[in-house]
Structures are given as structure tokens and as C-alpha cells.
Image (cartoon, helix red, strand yellow):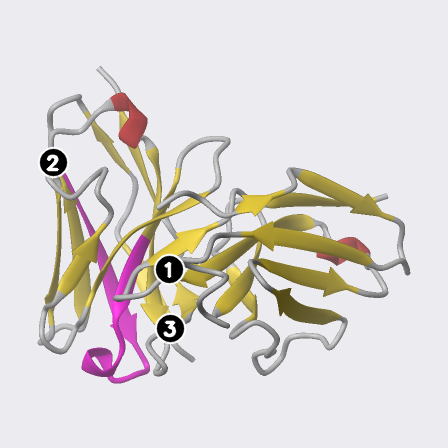
Amino acid sequence: QSALTQVASVSGSPGQSITISCTGTSSDVGSYNLVSWYQHHPGKAPKLMIYEGSKRPSGVSNRFSGSKSGKTASLTISGLQAEDEADYYCCSYAGRSTWVFGGGTKLTVL
Amino acid sequence: QVQLVQSGAEVKKPGASVRVSCKASDYTFINYGISWVRQAPGQGLEWMGWIDTYNGNRNYIEKVQDRVTMTTDTSTSTAYMELRSLRSEDTAVYYCARVDSSGYTVDYWGQGTLVTVSS
């Protein structure tokens, strides 16, 4: 079970949009539409932002959206704000009550 | 509001064991599984394992399966993760997290417990 692949860092200016990709295999992302995305500020608990590929939990801004194509899932953040600066992790269900995380992407808001 | 409150930071010597607790509140404990995730310094999140709080079924990742035991105490809505034969590379923040009612998404997280392994 290898970690999902995420780019290490991404940046954008306030108001811009950015997309973070997450590439897995046919055993995880490719087999299930069960990718979730977490926002993680250092020292705090991760926060669920997107689940089941594209669904937003109650209270999460609609500036956050998710999608999937084949073995790659994506998180898009539109209208970037300073408070969006954080680490973002994807996570895929991988069958039989197992999960696999991505390596994380550090988002910098310029 | 769902809460998972974990035990405090630990410092252990190599070869020792550590047990981290995770007390759940404001939901029915046995209706949701618990996953344990860790983050080593400067590294990403790593899923370690899962326990079904209803029947005790569990899964662990291969790299720790010989050294880890996840348990629950349903009378106190508390989950436990014990890691034995600690090594320096086990130094990490350990999180417990609830698996939602679908059984597929980790939704709520504890605040994390720093375990430091050092001689």
C-alpha cells in the first residue's frame, strides 16, 4: 500500500484558483469514488473538506470542490484567501476497511 | 459536537511501549469505527489501522502489525492504541479519527498526541 502522490507545494495569490492533484492506483483511487480531502494547519487536528470525491461537509465553504478522473482526484480552491494557507492531504478508501493518504501539499497564499 | 480527546504527550525510550487513549463524546461510540493516523516530523499523514468499535474487528498496516494493538472500552467510549518495541522512527504525532456512518470516510479527528522516542 503506497502513499498517494501529491505535488509537494502549490501557491496562488488571493482571489485566484488553485488545483491540487492526487494520483493513486487501480487499488484505491481508481477503484472507489471515496476520496476525501483534509485541511491541516500545523498543531491542529485535520479538518475534512471534501468527502466521497466531491461532497462538502456542512460548514465548508463552496470555494472548495473535488473531482476525480480515473486514478487521479483533484481539489480545487477558488477565490483563494489567506486563511486557506495550510497543508492539504488526500485520502482514499482502499477496500476492506483500509485507507491510504497522500504525501500532502503545502499551499502558500502569496 | 463530536469530540475526540486524546491523552497527553509521551516520551519513551527505544524498546518501550506506549498507549495512547482517545475518548469520544457526543455520539454513539459503537456506531462508528476509529482509525489511527500518525505524522512523523516533516512527513505526511500515515494511516496505521482501524478498529470496529462494535465487534472489535481490526486492520493494521503491514509495517506495524506485529507491534500495534488497537482496542476499545465501550463502557467509557474510549479507544486505545498501543505500540510496542518503540523505535526512533516511531516519533510522531498520533491521531485518532472517527470513521463516518458510511464506513468509508474519516470525518472527525482528535487533537493529536506527540510520542517521542529517544534514548
> Relative to A32, is B83 above or below?
above
Residue B6 location, quadrant: bottom left
Q: Chain of mark 2?
A: B
The Cα–Cα distance between marks 3 and 1, rounded to whole angstroms, is 18 Å
Q: Decide: marks 2, 3 in contact (CB < 8 A)?
A: no
Q: How many numbered circles does the render carry?
A: 3
Q: Callout 1: few (<14), some (14-19), or many (20+) C-alpha neighbours within 10 Å?
A: many
> What mark, if any, has residue B104 been given in the picture?
3
> Relative to B87, is B36 above or below?
below
The Cα–Cα distance between marks 2 and 3, rounded to whole angstroms, is 28 Å
In the image, B71 versus A76, the foreground residue is A76
> What mark, if any, has residue B67 been given in the picture?
none
Q: Position of residue A32 (x, y in %)?
A: 45, 70
Residue that appears at 21% across and 42% down: B62
Q: Where are the magenta residues, as a range?
A: B17-36
Residue that appears at 47% across and 56% down: A45
| Discs 3 and 1 carry the same chain letter | yes
In the image, A109 versus B75, the foreground residue is A109
Check disc 1 and give the amino acid type: Gly
In the image, A12 versus A34, the foreground residue is A34
* Image position of A12 (left or right of B63): right
The Cα–Cα distance between marks 2 and 1, rounded to whole angstroms, is 21 Å
Secondary structure at badge 3 equals loop
Q: Which residue is mark 1?
A: B110
Check disc 2 and give the amino acid type: Arg
Q: Position of residue B100 (x, y in %)?
A: 37, 77
Check disc 3 and give the amino acid type: Tyr
> What mark, if any, has residue B84 been given in the picture?
2
Q: Chain of mark 1?
A: B
Q: Quadrant of the C terminus of chain B?
A: top left
Residue that appears at 36% across and 58% down: A99
